[in-house]
Each structure stands twice: as structure tokens, then as C-alpha cells.
Image (cartoon, rainbow, N blue to C red):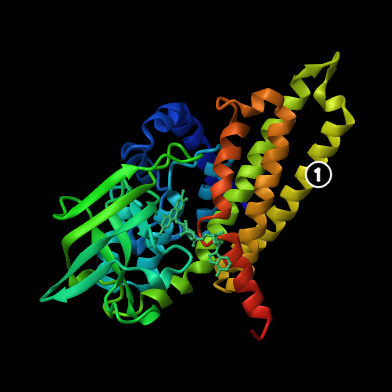
Amino acid sequence: MDEELALFRHTVARFIGAEMTPHDAEWREQHHVGADIWRRAGQLGLLCADIPAQYGGMGGTFRHEAILHEELARAGMTGFGSGVHSICAHYLLNHGQEEQKQRWLPRMAQGELIGAIAMTEPGAGSDLQAIRTRALRDGDDYIVNGSKLFITNGYLAGLLALAVKTDPAQRARGISILMVETKNLAGYRVGRILDKMGMKSQDTAELFFEDVRVPASNLLGGEPGNGFAQMMSDLPYERVIVALAAVGAMEGAIEATVRYVQERQAFGHALAEFQNARFKIAEVATIAKIARTFVDDCVARVAEGTLDTATASMAKWWTTDMQQQVLDECVQLHGGYGYMNEYLVCRMFADARVQRIYGGTNEIMKELIARSLLQR
Ligand SMILES: Cc1cc2nc3c(=O)[nH]c(=O)nc-3n(C[C@H](O)[C@H](O)[C@H](O)COP(=O)(O)OP(=O)(O)OC[C@H]3O[C@@H](n4cnc5c(N)ncnc54)[C@H](O)[C@@H]3O)c2cc1C
């Protein structure tokens, strides 16, 4: 952190507190945050913070990006899918042709075009190479047929980074990423917003494609068959975003719990006077500090472009496992109130569970780490 980053954090935190938190209950009820808050975040320059100014971004570094994801998690604002929006923008930045970057990035930075990453299908999650959504070439277009499941920002998204098979006979080499603009797109349909355990204000949705025509010029990077490699090369960035959300949530939950145990009375004492509460607070604060130190190092290495996949995978699985442990203790210290949705720690506890599942499951993370260390 330096003075400029501290100022940026202040702006982000103020925006979340003043313009997001008051709408949380309404957003949870409707299962999405609406398009207006995206445009507002864009107006304030909070989106695409690490995208160069020539493409409409803030021209900052991943340190700026990190602040947004952390502060959202600290406040429990898990419906605003800024992580996948940024990941979608980075696919364009890292692999897109110049014309593709110019076409989409400025609108993403303004919040006019909300990004989503559409990889998972009913029959293909961890085993991404098994996807069946096809994009077959027909003149200047691809014709897309298939469906996607569990897509974050799926209801609001105006731009999808869609994983497709351009050569269904092949596994990894048959995969490409098509950038798909969804507005008024014939044959494209958003299914229901899925009813989840947590993240109630996140518009996680099913997407359907029936003979959807997408211009061939929307193929990310222009060459078919590079999709799998493009996805793999951006994984450290994505995994650190998940880890940042874990650290932000742990810190936010601990702050709320520290306040709570000092206010709540039992047997004529504040809970904070009981040794168990004191020890539990000490334990979760230690875990959060270790996570913060590790993830800060990952952030610096993403900013330098030196973070390797195995370390990013360590950060993802460990911080999200710890997030769940820490949230469990915070709920316990709140007693029955911790089980009530009006309390932040309750919502955070439910939101935390999926962190171990998406972005590559924690088992897949361990597999990747093991692969980097073992011969077989
Ligand atoms: C709320 C939410 C948001 C999501 N957002 C998105 C999104 O924006 N875009 C998107 O494309 N996807 C998204 N996903 C999908 C998510 O990435 C997948 O659910 C995840 O990758 C796991 O795939 P799966 O559900 O098919 O489980 P499976 O792959 O069927 O896994 C089931 C279990 O088997 C284990 N397993 C599988 N293979 C192995 C192996 N080789 N070794 C050891 N264990 C293994 C897994 O770890 C897991 O425990 C989201 C999911 C949720 C719930």
C-alpha cells in the first residue's frame, strides 16, 4: 500500500458503503444487482482498474484491482461479479486482437457491458475439455449450439467469453473462446437465475444457444483451437481474485465479530471477557494475517507478471478453506444471531462455501500443485 492506493481504497469503500450496502436486501430478493450499479461503478472509474488507459481502463496495476475485490468481500457484497468481469476483460487484453480490445474494453470499463465467463456445462465442470457446446464455421460466422451452467453475471451479462468446441473431434486443441455480445442475439436465451445456498444477490444463471450466429471476427485472438491455452495462461490471475475475496471476507467477518463480542453480554460480562472468545478471536486473526501476507505477496507477483500456477493454486485452496473455518468460528461467537440472515457473518458463512468449489475446485488445485512437484 502507498498513499495513492490508500486513497483508492477509501473511494471504493465509500462507494460500497453508500451505494451498494443500502440495496443489499433488495438485490438479494431479486437475485441480481441490476445494471445501474455497474454503470455507476464505471462512471467512478472503479472497473477495469488494471486495464491500460488506451482501452478505457484506469491504467492502474493489479494492486488497484485487488482493492476492489477485497473491499466488496469485506462488506459481503458478493452479488456484484466484478471478479469475472475483470477476468473477461483480461482475456481480451492478453489474447485479443487490437480491434477486439478497442471494440469491447472501453464499454466494459464504463460498466455498459458486463462481462461473464461461460465455460461450465451440465456435463463438464472440472473436466473442461469435455465441453460440448459447438461453434461450427459457416461463411463469415460461427453457428453456436449448446448450453452453459452456473454462469456468474449470467443474467446481466452483455459480453460472454464463451468456451466452445470449434473442432468437436479434439479435446483441448478443439477449444476456442468466442466473444459473444448477447443483446438482441437471436437464438440466445438466459434460463432461470439459479437458487443457491448463498450469494443470493448474484445472478448465477443457465445460458442456452440454439443456432446462434456469431461473427467469426469475434473469435478471441482470431485463430481457432487456442481457447484452452488462453484459459490456462490466465489462471493465476483468476485464482488470486478468489483468494482476495477470501481474505477480504475473513477480515470483514473478524471486524464484525470483534465488535459483537464486546457488546454482547452473558452472565453479567461482555463475551469478550470469556477466555474462549478471546482465544477464538486470536486464532482467527492469526489465520487472517497469514492469509493476508501470503495473498499480498501473490498480488505483487501478479502485478509483476511472475506468479506461477502452483503458487496461485495454493493461495486459492488454502485461503478459501481458511475462510470457511474462520466464518464458522465467527458464526459460533455470534450464537443464535449468527444464524440470522440479517447478520453479516451469517450471509458470509453461506457465501463462503462456494469459494472452495468454483474457480477450479480445491481438489483440482491440489492436483495442480502435486503435478508441479511430482514426476507423475
Ligand atoms: C455459484 C457458482 C458460480 C460459478 N460461476 C461460474 C462461472 O462464472 N463460469 C463458469 O464457467 N463456471 C462457473 N461455475 C462452475 C464451477 O466452476 C464448477 O462448478 C466447478 O469447476 C466444478 O465443476 P462441477 O460442478 O461440474 O463439479 P465436478 O467437476 O463434477 O466435481 C465434483 C467433485 O469431484 C471432484 N473432482 C473432479 N475431478 C477430480 C479430479 N481429477 N481429481 C480429484 N477430484 C476431482 C471435484 O473436486 C468435486 O469435489 C460456478 C459455480 C457456482 C456454484
* Residue 271 percent across, percent down from the top left: 81, 24
Q: Write the residue at 39% across / 71% down.
A: 130
* Residue 178 percent across, percent down from the top left: 28, 68
Q: Relative to 105, is 68 above or below? A: above
Left or right: where does residue 60 sit relative to residue 132? Answer: right
Q: For the C terminus, which image quadrant?
A: bottom right
Q: Quadrant of residue 169?
A: bottom left
Left or right: where does residue 274 sit relative to residue 2? Answer: right
Seen from this angle, which residue lies furthest bottom?
375
Q: Quadrant of residue 44?
A: top left
Q: Residues within 10 Å of mark 1 (few under 14, many from 20)?
A: some
* Residue 2 percent across, percent down from the top left: 62, 53
**Mark 1 sits on what residue?**
283
Seen from this angle, which residue lies furthest top?
268
Q: Relative to 76, is 172 above or below? A: below
Which is more toward the observer, 236 or 339?
339
Helix, strand or loop status at disc 1:
helix
Left or right: where does residue 191 sit relative to residue 327? Answer: left
Q: Write the residue at 50% across / 68% down.
A: 235
Left or right: where does residue 151 sit relative to residue 307? Answer: left
Q: Relative to 32, is 29 above or below? A: above
* Residue 16 percent across, percent down from the top left: 49, 36
Please state the total of marks drawn on the protein image.
1
Seen from this angle, which residue lies furthest left?
139
Q: Is residue 52 visible?
A: no
User: Residue flagged by tag 1: what amino acid is it?
Assistant: Glu
Which is more toward the observer, 365 or 296?
365
